[in-house]
Image: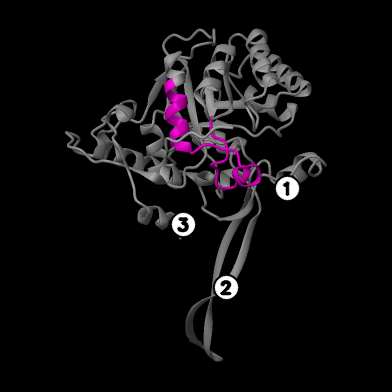
Amino acid sequence: MRIEDDRKLDYRDVLIRPKRSTLGSRKDVDLCRQFNFRNSRLKQQDFHYQGIPVMASNMDGVGTFAMADALAQLDLFTCLVKSYSVEELIAFFSTGSSARQDHVAYSMGIMPPDFEKFKTVYQSVNTSVKYVCVDVANGYSERFSDFIKSMRDSFPDIIIIAGNVVTGEMTEELILSGADVIKVGIGPGSVCTTRIKTGVGFPQLSAVMECADSAHGLGGHIIADGGCTCSGDVAKAFAAGADFVMLGGLLAGHDEGGGEIITHYRKSGEVTKGEQGWEDVIEEQKFVQFYGMSSYAANKKHFGGLKEYRSSEGREVLVPYRGSIDATVQDILGGIRSTCTYAGAKKLKWLSKCATFVKTGQQYNELFEK
């Protein structure tokens, strides 16, 4: 046993220091990024990826076909949920615009049936699947690295996203095993209880910094996955060195995510005069259920319940119903553009070089807990 004495930081522990800038307006900020990927042999005329590197997570209520199509039109990315059938996936990737190929990832686990399912889809759609997200809760197992190697050997052209991890050495191992993009984050998500149930985790801002440094040294890339509660957190993730930022809760509750709309009624605290005299004003509130993919709800939906050797590591919550995704995306991207103007970064690519973090005090942190 040993203790690391240097302090690790979450998004709420820092702010970005403003500095002089020549930018006159938020509209002058370029949020698009262009990437080539280290291990994929896919031949592209210019770049493997071009777009705004904000991703929808492969979670129920977020990583849906409808969400993928809506975000692709806005130049954002989606990792699909794992639960779609072979037939549904073939139909999705066989139709639609090229934006589906360029902004959508197939998601999978590491069991033999997962491999065979992907192989069937990949061969059936004439390699229209460009990205695959190999997603497990614990990316530190030897069999995970071995699986990434087998995926790279079997599908040399595919762009492989792999995770989750939170340390530099495992980021390096997965890249050297054949992954192109590493998903970073254990326990920071709003509906994840891994840190509570297991005591395992790593503060997300420091994890992003460490993993970005390791990945970029090898020509790889990372995704900051989880922990963003507002557009300011997304900007901090990019400032810390993330190439992509993956969102779950911030994109939940929209029409494109599906899910039943649950209506609650409550007294607003106001009264109005009606035919029967003074009456309480009843407020209508709409919600959508959102849950972690290791929660009891997710296990019941996809696996018939929790296995006897497992416990739930996710929450089930109600998030406000938010209508179409467009307004939320505009709000998030507007916040990032504003960050860039404060930091003097005309391009999102420059933000990590322009940003200076300042540690905040306990009083500031308490604002997030209320």
Q: Amino acid at mark 2?
A: Arg
Count residues near mark 2 (Cα–Cα under 10 Å), then give few for <14, some for 14-19, many for 20+: few
Residue 134 visible within the image: yes
Residue 331 visible in image: no
In this figure, which residue is indicated by the disc labeled 1? 296
Q: Which numbered disc flags the more N-terminal residue, 3 or 1?
A: 1
Sequence-wise, the earlier of marks 3 and 2 is 2
Helix, strand or loop under label 1? helix
Residue picked out by circle 2: 266
The magenta stretch is 184-213
- Nearer the observer: mark 3 or 1; the answer is 3
Across and down, in percent, residue 10 comes to 44, 41
Disc on res. 174: none
Establish if 328 lies above or below 140. below
CA distance separating discs 1 and 2: 28 Å
Q: Quadrant of residue 284?
A: bottom right
Task: Estimate the x, y position of residue 366 in percent, counting from the top left.
Answer: 41, 57
Foreground: disc 1 or disc 2: 1
The amino acid type found where label 3 is placed reads Glu
Give the farthest residue toward the bottom.
Answer: 277
x and y percent of residue 308 in the render? 83, 42
Q: Please give the residue where the numbered disc 3 appears in the rendered image.
A: 369
Judge whether residue 204 is colored magenta.
Answer: yes
| Residue 313 left/right relative to 250 | right
